[in-house]
Image (tube, rainbow, N blue to C red):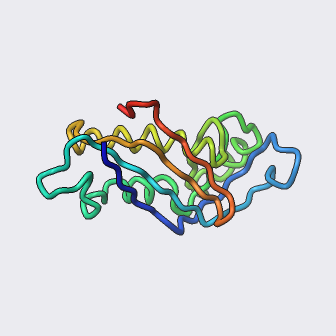
Amino acid sequence: MITCSKTFADIPLAHRQHAHPGPCRFIHGHSWSIRVTFACEQLNEHGFVVDFGKLGYLQTWIDEHLDHGIMLANDDAAAKKLIDAEPGLFKVFWVDQPSCEGLAEVLFETFNGLLKQHERGRAWVTSVEVWEDPRNMTRYTADTSGR
């Protein structure tokens, strides 16, 4: 197996962890970065795990779902009231857990599915790292096969 990584940086995204006892319960934002690690057993015809120049579909997904958006918990009743009161004010990305850890898991599943589709199963995602700022990062890793 051989791997390579691509980083998508400087993604403005707000979030709120409504059940947190500290200041994270308030809406706040970060400049997030996402590193995706890809793997394969057989390089493509150009000698790549993946062609970085052909990963625009991942950037498009990020732009459509995260960029200048807000990540909120599916069970955040106050957030749902706010969104219902002003439905066009926010670009909302609803998740079970609006943390680095929760986002990394969602991105892993999403990006792995997109990559497998585009690469016809030849390559897969082995991990996704998410930074909410330069000091705080989490990594979601596949099982041993990544497939």
Task: Give above or below for 89 relative to 112.
Answer: below
Q: Position of residue 113 (x, y in %)?
A: 35, 38
Which residue does the image show at 81% across and 49% down from the upper left? 25
Pick whichever, 60 or 133, lies toward us: 133
Q: Position of residue 39 (x, y in %)?
A: 33, 45
Quadrant where the C terminus is found in the figure: top left
Q: Position of residue 122 (x, y in %)?
A: 22, 39
Task: Give above or below for 52 relative to 44.
Answer: below
In this rendering, would 29 be left or right of 115? right
- Residue 115 seen by the camera: no
Q: In the orientation shown, which residue stands out farthest toward the right?
A: 21
Total residue callouts:
0
Pick whichever, 33 or 78, lies toward us: 33
Q: In the orientation shown, which residue stands out farthest toward the bottom?
A: 10
Task: Give above or below for 13 relative to 101.
Answer: below
Which residue does the image show at 16% across and 50% down from the upper left? 44
Pick whichever, 144 or 37, lies toward us: 144
Quadrant where the N terminus is found in the figure: top left
Q: Position of residue 18 (x, y in %)?
A: 78, 43
Which residue does the image show at 44% across and 37% down from the upper left? 109
Task: Give above or below for 19 relative to 8.
Answer: above
- Residue 87 seen by the camera: yes
Q: In the orientation shown, which residue stands out farthest toward the left?
A: 45
